[in-house]
Image (cartoon, helix red, strand yellow):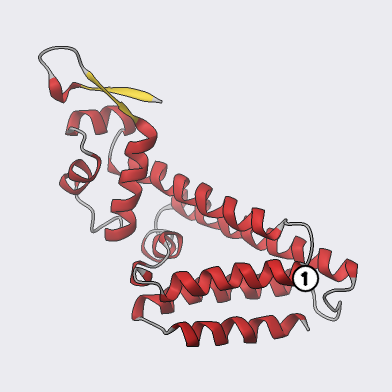
Amino acid sequence: MTLSDNRSAPGRPREFDIDAAVESAMQVFWTRGYNGTSLVDLIDGTGLSRGSLYKAFGDKHGLFLFALDRYISVSSIQLINNLRKPGSVKAALRETLSLFAQLSCAADGSRGCMLVATATEMAPYDAGVAERVKAMMDRIRDAYAAAIARGQASGEIPARHDAESLAELIVCLTHGMRVVGKVGPTAKQMAAVVDTAMAMFD
């Protein structure tokens, strides 16, 4: 989708890709947080004019909601698709947990998770943001619960634990891993967390 950027006036307005602008804005918000991001940061990050940003998104908060929705969509698709893979549920769970471990101790692990940062910074006083964060966490929990239930039905995972409770525990664990990632855990530490978590399914 493209919109016109009038910064090049006089002359024909220049068109820009709104999806690319949202992606760029998402990167800025993810790095700096909502309150730490200024309009100048967004103009520099997207390459758009002040007028174009306001015309397309209304204001900073409107642009942030677009960026948050994009982050939620992209991150949830990968996770849910991974958990729905045919074959071993335990293997899918380990692969998913290992991804969080890798993200937590990677070079940019200190950046953390945009969803977690947003929940901490904005959810207590912004109902629209809180609703989005809750919906995302519910969707992730449901995906874990469905995978665990599938593993229990096949006999791969013991049925002694409630699938919903295990799923809630994983959500808490993985988001906690991203918080710990901000202070530089080692790959060995995060691998041990994954091994300990997987023991729940034995």
Residue 77 visible in image: yes
Q: Is residue 31 left or right of residue 134?
A: left
Identify the image quadrant of residue 106.
bottom left
Q: Where 121 falls versus 53 (above or below)?
A: below
Residue 4, given in percent of the width and then of the height, sits at: 27, 21
Q: Callout 1: few (<14), some (14-19), or many (20+) C-alpha neighbours within 10 Å?
A: many
Q: Position of residue 124 (x, y in %)?
A: 42, 62
Quadrant assignment for the N terminus? top left
Q: Residue at x 34, y 57 (%)?
A: 30
Residue hosting label 1: 163
State the residue lying farthest toward the top. 11
Using the image, determine if residue 25 lies above or below residue 106: above
Residue that appears at 52% across and 54% down: 75
Tell whether 136 sits left or right of 180: right
Q: Name the residue at 36% across, 63% down.
A: 121
Relative to 113, residue 64 above or below = above
Badge 1 marks a residue whose secondary structure is helix
Q: Amino acid at mark 1?
A: Ala
In the rendered image, which quarter contains the C terminus? bottom right
List x then y, in percent, for residue 76: 57, 53
Whether residue 53 sits left or right of residue 181 in the image: it is left
Q: Residue furthest left?
A: 10
Looking at this view, is 26 or 101 the one in front?
A: 101
Q: Identify the residue shown where x is 21% and y is 34%.
A: 48
Is residue 44 depicted above or below 14 in this figure? below
Q: Nearer the viewer, residue 103 or 152?
A: 103
Left or right of 52, for residue 188? right
